[in-house]
Amino acid sequence: MIITTVAIISYLTNSYLFTKLKDYSVITAAIIEEFLKTYGGYVLGQILLVHIVFGVVEGFIDIKNNGKMGVFPAIFSLLGHAAFGYITVTVYNLTGNITYGLLSGVFSHVIYNTLVVGVVNNLNNQS
């Protein structure tokens, strides 16, 4: 329940920031989400699980907001957050430093978000 609540708070915060920052919110969203997921998971002793739950919650939101058009974004949300979690846990396990794990997740998430926004903007400009 705690993980789901934090995921929803993160979603609402990111939605608000998107209204103010537009495409630049890809950076703030990655920082906010990775911080919440990583440190929340660290406290709970379940970093990867917290990342996966975030992906599931975000996926449900994608489907709720977009119907059938939200299925592919939902799948990518789940896979992306699971991948960020795996990267975070791997770096943390290799270094023993949670901050390095967090930073690796943030960098991965920023790169992913930037690519997704670029693709979506490109598709929107073609129509």
Image (tube, rainbow, N blue to C red):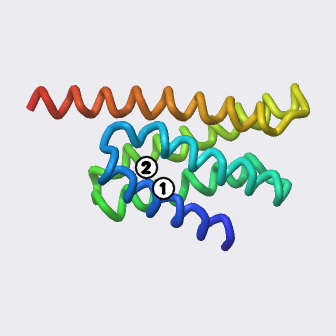
Q: Amino acid at mark 2?
A: Ala
The residue located at (43%, 38%) in the rendering is: 26
Is residue 27 placed above or below 6 in the rendered structure? above
Mark 1 highlights which residue? 58
Q: Which residue is mark 2?
A: 74
Q: Residue furthest bottom?
A: 1
- Dividing the picture into quadrants, the one containing residue 50 is bottom right
Question: Is the residue under label 1 in contact with that under label 2 (CB below 8 Å)?
Answer: yes
What element does badge 2 sit on?
helix
Alpha-carbon distance for marks 2 and 1?
7 Å
Q: Nearer the viewer, residue 107 or 21?
A: 21
Q: Quadrant of the C terminus?
A: top left
**In the visual, does 2 lie left or right of 93?**
left
Q: Mark 1: which secondary structure?
A: helix
Where residue 25 sits: x, y (%)?
40, 42
Name which residue type carries label 1.
Glu
Q: Nearer the viewer, residue 116 or 104?
A: 104
Relative to 123, 8 lies left or right: right
Image position, residue 34 (x, y; %): 62, 45
Classify mark 1: residues with Cα within 10 Å, few (<14), some (14-19) or many (20+): many
Q: Quadrant of the N terminus?
A: bottom right
